[in-house]
Image (cartoon, helix red, strand yellow):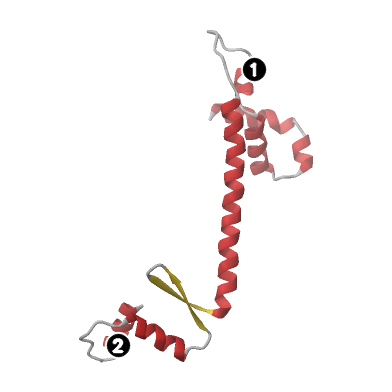
Amino acid sequence: MANLYKTRLEQLGAMVTNRIHTTRLKDRLLSVLPDLRAHSQGRDTLLLFEKDIGPALKKACDHDSDAMHLVRAAQVVRREMFQTRFTFDGAFHADCQKDSVTPSLLALVNMILDGANIKHQTKLANTNTTTAALTVS
């Protein structure tokens, strides 16, 4: 912000020879703009208008919540994948590719493709197609 302020002063024809004192600049901005709030984060200070704080915090919380849901889904799929043991006896069985796709992975992919609709989950018609697509990829 101090660099932007210095650049703007120079554009307006003011001669700036000293470094801009950032704390004084922040204090001047806060005194002139009553809705402006300062939030310290380490050595940085964020200047936000009061009306922007609520939506910004909600957006950050929503993204954190989405990330936690994705982490949980990945943990479920990984746990089931690593608990499943396959043995190879020198020949492939007829359903070996279908059996290699865990139910949780299949359910997750079906939910991504079809949505979390119970009608889609109870139909097994698309399950074989999804299983085949997963084993090929």
Residue placed furthest toward the top: 90
Q: In terms of sequence position, does the residue under pointer 2 or pointer 1 come before the other?
A: 2
The correct choice, above or below, for 41 with respect to 17 in the image is: above
Say few, some or many: other residues with alpha carbon within 10 Å of mark 1 (under 14 / 14 to 19 / 20 or more). few
**Label 2 sits on what residue type?**
Leu
Displayed quadrant of residue 85: top right
Q: Answer with left or right where residue 32 lies relative to residue 128.
A: left
Say few, some or many: other residues with alpha carbon within 10 Å of mark 2 (under 14 / 14 to 19 / 20 or more). few
Q: Can you tell which mark lies on residue 65?
A: none
Residue placed furthest toward the left: 17
**Label 1 sits on what residue type?**
Asp
Judging from the image, what secondary structure is the residue with disc 2 in? helix
Q: Nearer the viewer, residue 99 or 30?
A: 30
At horizontal 62% and vertical 34% (from top left) the residue drawn is 105
Displayed quadrant of residue 60: bottom right
Q: Can you tell which mark lies on residue 95?
A: 1
The correct choice, above or below, for 81 with respect to 18 in the image is: above
Q: Where's residue 100, x and y in %?
A: 60, 23
Q: Can you tell which mark lies on residue 9?
A: 2
Displayed quadrant of residue 8: bottom left
